[in-house]
Structure formats: C-alpha cells, structure tokens
C-alpha cells in the first residue's frame, strides 16, 4: 500500500470518498488545497478582509485558523480571533489556554470573553437553576451574540467558524426532516450580506469531513482541545448524525451529494421564502433584534440577570 | 382504554402522530376523511374526471380504488383500472385475480396488460438473461409506459397511484441525500400538467402512513395481496426507509414535517430548475420521449426484443 500521489509507503489514510491512499504530507496538502478551493469557489474572502476566527481551541476552529493564516501570510487578509469562555468547570479552561497559545504563536489579535464578565452568570450557574431549558440553547445564543459584538468591536469584516462537512449535512438533514424551511435558507458556505447589522459569516471547512479534520490536526501536530462538552446530550442532531454516518459506510459520497443537492435547492429557492431581517434594536442591549428584546436579553431576563 | 372519538372500548389503534386511540369505525372514518381532505386541498380531482387507478391488488392500490369510489358514487368522477402483469411466477397471479374481483365488485371498466403480450417477454425471462440490470429498473419503466398508454386508450383524464406517506417521504429523502434535484421537482401530490403528452398523476394516499393503510384494509375486510415481490432487494430505498422509521419512533410527527417541508421547498423552487419535457416521440413506439428511443424501447433493444 502506497500513497496514490507520491508513492510514499507511509500511508496514513484511505480517503472515504475517492478511495485514494495518502501519506502524511500529501494528506495535509489535500486538505489545505480543498479549503482554499472552497474559499475561492464560494468567494469567502475579499482582499483586505479582517477575518475574526471564532476560536474555541477545538480541532475545527484551530484548523480554520491555521489554514486561513496562509491567506494572511500572503497579505490577502488580516486575522483576529475571539474565544468565548462559557464558564464550564473542568472543561473550558483547557480550550481557552490552547486558543491563547495559538494566537500568540501566530501573532494575531485575540480576545477572550467570558459569559461571567459579559452577563454576570456562567453556564454552570445557569444549569443549576430550576427553570433552565437545554444548555445548548443558552450557549448557542450567548456565544453568537458575543461573537457578533466582538466582530464589530475588532473591526472584522467577516466571521469564520469551524463548521465541517458533517456539521453542515446534519443541519441540512435536520431541517429537511423538521420541515424548517426558514432555517434551510440560512445555511451555506457564506451568510447573506443583506442583513447589514450582522457581519458576514463564512465556513471554510464546509467540505471537509470531520474525521479528516481530526487527522489533519494530528498530522500537523497542532495542539487542540479534544474533550467533548460535558453538557452535550444525545440530541436530535446526534441521532441524525448516526444515521448519516451509517448510510456513509455503504455510500461513501453521500455527504457530498447531499451538500451539492442542498446548494442547488438553496440557489433555486432564491428569494422564494420571504426572509425577515431584524428591523429594530433590542431595548436592553441595543443589538439588532426582530423583537423588543433580543434572544440573549430574553434569556437574561428569564434568568433574573 | 377507549376510543378518543366515540368512547367505544374496542380500540384498534393508537395513532402515532396524534396519540389518539380509535375504534374500528372511527379509524376507518379518519382514514377516508383524511384522503378526501388531501383530494380537496391538493385539487386532485375535477368534476367529470375519468380516473384510471393503477391497481396491483396490493393494499395501497385497493385502498385508493375503494376511497376514490366514494367520489364515483357521488357522480363526481368516473373510474377505470389497469393491472400490469409483469410475469412473475408464484407471485403476480394472486394480485391480478384480486384486482379482477375488486373491479367486478365495483362494476368498473378494468384491463389487465401483461409484459408478455405487450413486449413478448416476462420479468422472469428478463431476470434469466446474463446482461440484465436490476429488476426494479425494468419493472418501473415498463409499468409506467403501460399505464400511460392504458390511460390514453381508456380516455382517462387522471392516473391515481397508491403511493403512501412512507413511499413519498422515502423518495424525498433519497433525492435529498443523492442530490437529485431534478427528481425532487417531480414528486408531490399531483404531477405537473405542463407535459401535455402525459396524463396527470395523482397520489390520494400521500398523507396516510403505510401501517395505517395495512390496518384499513383489515378493518374494512378488503381482499388484498399482501406478499412482497420476490425480486425486491435490500435497496437504498430500504435503507432510507429503515432510518426514517427509526427516527419516527422517538419523533412520531417526523414523516409529516418532512413532507410539509418538502412541499414548501417545491413551491418556493417553482420554475427554479429548468424542467425539460419530451419534445419528440420515440422512433420505435411513438410514445413521448426526450431521446430517439424511449426508455422502454431502449431496454427492449438491449434485451433483443
């Protein structure tokens, strides 16, 4: 068994989709080339962009930072990063430390924002309350708000997140199954720039399978936080993920075909669903919001904060 | 435990979606009402229609015939039926006989067309050839051609098939996963009437789960052919069906939400995908075809017929 590209006998992966065997160097190159291809095809970056990487310290965000940094080294873009400390004991600190070390290594502007400083409450404290809803609901909303705010404060023109192929296909299938057509129009490699209140979000790793990102950070010897969040439960996403992975065993290209199909559907729908963008601002924090209070402030009021 | 509608203590089903318990009579009524609701909502029938039911003798087509017959009894439509005899030993004859008895019982015009008479070859004979592809490919194409032809010969204005909720959601999810966006625009309760060469197809049972149709024929004591086709294999459809059924256990409304979502997507896409309709006719048989030979005649040439 030897590398399908260079003949090296130290093969580290058989690519599920193409069936290619690759050695370490050719594998690293294949991932980086594919991300760059996505960036170009989807026009994710414009010269002069300042890209804020949402950097948790996990494999996906560290890979996003690492590969986008090649555009920074070519002086095409500038990069900054933000790490959200949700306040989860025995879990979050390691990711925060790793994020700090990566930012320092690359010499990029980096900011750590904690829920405690920002809202006076940690996720651990929220989860101790009697009337709490799922942890992911709070975490998702607060993190999104903090990242959007950081983008404005740091003058970022784009926000890059680490969503990979598995994440994206799971979201697509979940929304198909639940019939959430409004959410379906919000997925994709790049968020709409029509909602001027929000910085455009990009997903450079959208075509890279999760397992290949895991192998990439090992091959590149990048320090990452591998633990799973202690609040992660068996969710609908987990069920859908299991089913897609089961189908992928017999149909190795199915994640890609589902993604391509979705992209064609999204394009064909165009403005077929009326999209509403927040027209006003949250009375409490001033963030853009469709309602009197934004989702984050609604949660904070419910939590008595 | 008693019927949620009439209080009868002889409950025969707990409806998966609504959680209702129903007795035999209320269950039968619920199915018939729901089909009639689909017919009205989707405008499947016009007064004066002559509907050709594709009648295999299985539970789905017998139920379709039975419920559409209520529109015939009210003199809204006329009904005729066609049964295709594919030529499968120890399997097909029972369905054919059952179809004949139903047509006779209801006093409707009925035609049995065999692959042998029509094309000089049975499905059994095809499957004995060395160079055959999957049985379902031949069967699907030949059956469709025979049914379309019968509709024209019998002066039918609509063709009704027995596709149920499970069939439809399977097809939707298969096409999502495979990225077959062209096929996606062809699903739905009613085929497009833009292709004037083809009789409009309707699916009155599209919102009825498969298991409820099985129970309906038992409750109504309708004679049906329950055997599975001996050529049916573990196909991609089978895998997708298993996955959807697994999800349905924990999420009992998921088939409906997926269907509703698809219908909204289809409407939003509108003419977003360029649809091509056959512009010419098959050189061999004269049926409408996009190519020189229609799919049925292509198969026949390959089979040396």
Image: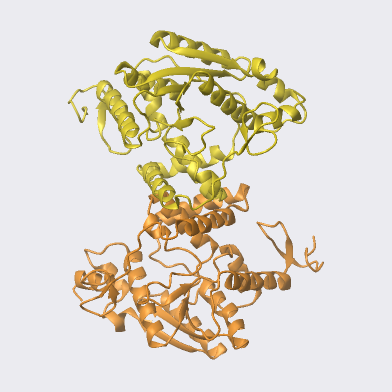
Chain colours: A yellow, B orange
User: What x and y, as percent, mark residue A69?
Assistant: 36, 19
Question: Is B260 located above or below residue A290 in the figure?
Answer: below
Residue A134 relative to residue A189: left or right:
right
- Report the number of numbered marks: 0
Quadrant assignment, res B157: bottom left
Foreground of the two, A74 or B105: A74
Of the 4 image quadrants, the one containing the N terminus of chain A is top left
Of the 4 image quadrants, the one containing the C terminus of chain A is top right
Residue A24 relative to residue B182: left or right:
left
Foreground of the two, B178 or A290: A290
Question: Is A226 located above or below residue B205 in the figure?
Answer: above
Foreground of the two, B108 or A34: A34
User: What x and y, as percent, mark residue A92?
Assistant: 57, 16
User: Furthest residue to the right?
Assistant: B7
User: What x and y, as percent, mark residue B192?
Assistant: 43, 69
Residue beneath the point at 59% across and 63% down:
B211
Residue beneath the point at 61% across and 14% down:
A90
In this rendering, does residue A232 appear at all?
no
In this rendering, does residue B98 appear at all?
yes
Residue beneath the point at 22% across and 27% down:
A3
Residue B72 relative to residue B131: left or right:
right
User: What x and y, as percent, mark residue A61?
Assistant: 45, 23
Quadrant assignment, res A183: top right
Question: Is A149 located above or below residue A280 in the figure?
Answer: above
């Amino acid at each position: 068994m030897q590398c399908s590209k260079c003949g090296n006998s130290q093969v580290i992966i058989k690519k599920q989709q193409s069936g290619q065997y690759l050695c370490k160097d050719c594998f690293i190159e294949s991932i980086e080339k594919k991300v760059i291809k996505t960036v170009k095809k989807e026009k994710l970056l414009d010269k002069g962009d300042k890209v804020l990487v949402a950097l948790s310290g996990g494999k996906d965000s560290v890979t996003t930072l690492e590969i986008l940094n090649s555009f920074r080294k070519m002086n095409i873009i500038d990069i900054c990063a933000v790490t959200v400390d949700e306040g989860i004991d025995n879990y979050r600190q390691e990711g925060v430390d790793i994020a700090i070390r990566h930012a320092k290594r690359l010499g990029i502007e980096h900011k750590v924002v904690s829920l405690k400083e920002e809202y006076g409450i940690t996720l651990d404290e929220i989860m101790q309350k009697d009337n709490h809803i799922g942890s992911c609901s709070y975490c998702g909303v607060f993190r999104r708000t903090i990242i959007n705010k950081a983008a404005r404060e740091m003058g970022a023109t784009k926000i890059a997140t680490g969503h990979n192929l598995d994440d994206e296909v799971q979201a697509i299938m979940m929304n198909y199954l639940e019939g959430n057509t409004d959410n379906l129009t919000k997925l994709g490699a790049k968020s709409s720039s029509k909602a001027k209140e929000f910085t455009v979000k990009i997903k450079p790793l959208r075509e890279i399978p999760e397992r290949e990102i895991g192998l990439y950070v090992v091959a590149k010897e990048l320090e990452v936080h591998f633990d799973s969040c202690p609040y992660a439960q068996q969710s609908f996403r987990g069920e859908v993920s299991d089913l897609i992975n089961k189908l992928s065993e017999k149909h190795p290209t199915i994640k890609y075909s589902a993604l391509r199909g979705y992209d064609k559907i999204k394009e064909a729908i165009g403005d077929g669903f009326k999209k509403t963008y927040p027209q006003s601002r949250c009375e409490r924090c001033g963030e853009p919001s469709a309602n009197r209070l934004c989702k984050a402030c609604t949660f904070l009021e419910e939590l008595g904060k």
